[in-house]
Amino acid sequence: MRRQAILCLLLQLIFELSSCTRLRVTPGSTLELPCLSFQSDFAAEEISWKFNGEDLSVGIQSHGSVSIKQNGLVLSISPVTAANEGGYECLIKESNMELVRVYNITVDAPIAYAIKVTEGTSIRLPCYLQPSTQAEANALWFRVTGAGGKTQLSLEEDSAEDFQRMEQLYPNDPDQTIIIRNVGMKDTGTYQCESTAGEKLSTVDIIVVSPPTSPPFTCSTDAWEPCQDENSRTGGPMLQESVTEFSMKLFSYLREIYPNTNLLFSPVSIDGALSHLLLGARDDTRRAIQQALCVSHDFYCVHFQMKKLREKLSDSLQMASQIFYSPQMNLSESFNNQSIEFYEAKPMKLLETNEQNTAMINSWVANKTKSKITHLVDSVSPLTQLILLNAVSFNGQWKVKFRSRKGLFQKLDGDLVPVSLLFHSKYPLKMGYVAELKAQVAKFALTGKSSLYIILPRTYKPTDLQQVEDKMTDVAVYQMIEEMERTEVQHVEVSLPKVKLDVQPDMNILLKKLGLSSLYEGANLCGLYSEDRLVLDEAKHRAYFELNEQGVEAGAATSLSFSRSFPTFSAMRPFILLLWSDQANVPLFVGRVTEP
């Protein structure tokens, strides 16, 4: 009887999974294709996916928007584009049995939008392109003219007189949305977004209407609301949670922009710069920054808690802020006082020339990062009104020293490259497999009440790295840290590559991804400057990180202008690093090493 029941189940699976499911989807949507149509902990010897006959399990990185999840049981496509149209086949091999499920995907015609916009404001024209792991040509935008003709929009800085008014928000990104600023009646019409191959991706009809009569710009220069309960036991944990959530949100955006390269950023530096800016933000700008920082709108103690956080971190990390402003500006006295009180930053006037200001800013950054970063800005425009800086410097020593050796590091493409490494035959270490992340994790204790977590995927393959990164949420990070706290120290043979990272991610794209595009269009910083809205010209962030025999050295600056008897741990393949403050319970640096 038991044998008969098993046979019936297999027959049912073979019949169901051999059938073809037909789906129609719209571009820009998210689609998940399950290999099994029922919930199961099914574990197979081999699961593979094919797209139009091509093995996705091998070439997944060439299909940008496509990812394989849940050990191969689910294929995710996000966002869907016309390039995703075709046949998908899932093959499960188990002993002498093969189960097949086939999907036939049809992608509907390009998305059409009709947008009504008020004259003098800004408008975004949406478009989604097939994502890629490598920088490829951006989509092309056209304005439709009479008799079926069209004129291409010039969005390149060196070829468009109107570049500052019409701009691609996220170059070389799946999101090919453009922005048109200061829209006029002449902009009324139909616009098309196409791939370089001529594939139509979206159509946008713009209707421009006259603006209502608006009152002159006025704003309140009142100081930031006082923290009513400085002794509250909840204020500190609230800020810690928001900083960690913000950190993982940054990580998710940055790994989309840079899917395979070395990656490094300091979330506390970026958080510190935006929090300092929040001190002077009001109304819509204040709400946008609070949302970006994952801070509640009624958390008035955010600046007081940022001050306490900086004090907690002082054993291992030094954080500094500074504001430089145009001599023609009259900064709010209340902002000036609160900037000193909460951020120990007395605003300073800019100097007369570009050269003087560039040297002054880079000198400040070098001093605050202990010369780890000596060059942050290339120049300072004579039109610059405000520059806000934040810099952090970290130095943590190993509690047990390493010896130097030579070894081989396996890159994402499988190539082995010779590197210098740090080696210890019996290092006292907390190490374990974290099931939630599907990764091996090691915790290295550092001086200054900090720890370095190395998160190691199962193999060197990009799919395994991506799978771990997909699971790196703030909740998962806290669970990992709690699990490692409960883990006993054991003596482990450790091999770590010597690492020296100096990374400058594109902060302008990152801020826009955080929902802060309004900073580039006119920010309400009434608490700082009440005479007019300010426009952010440029944002910069640069982070430095080094693993050597002594320990960990790191620095970052953010600018807003405007078979053994004992176990082993070998991080000689791509891994994720998390530098964590045990004292303040927040992440200091987050990164990825693919090439040491």
Image: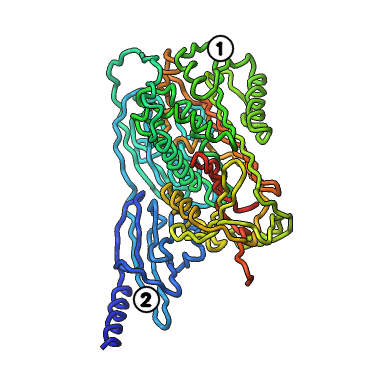
**Coloration of the structure image:** rainbow
119, above or below 494, in the image: above
- How far from the left and from the top, in percent, is residue 572? 63, 59
190, above or below 349, in the image: below
Task: Give the class, few, some or many, for how many residues have Cα within 10 Å of label 2's Cα (few <14, many ≥20).
Answer: some
Residue 271 visible = yes
* Side of 462 relative to 478 (left or right): right
Q: Mark 1 — residue?
A: 327
Give the mark nearest the N terminus, 2 or 1. 2
- How far from the left and from the top, in percent, is residue 364? 64, 25
Type of amino acid at the residue the image marks with label 2: Leu
Q: Give the position of the N terminus as an image quadrant.
A: bottom left
Q: Mark 2 — residue?
A: 99
Q: Secondary structure at mark 1?
A: loop
- How far from the left and from the top, in percent, is residue 196? 48, 48
Q: Secondary structure at mark 2?
A: strand
Task: Give the class, few, some or many, for how many residues have Cα within 10 Å of label 1's Cα (few <14, many ≥20).
Answer: some
Type of amino acid at the residue the image marks with label 1: Pro
Distance of mark 2 from mark 1, alpha carbons?
Answer: 73 Å
Between disc 2 and disc 1, the foreground one is: 1
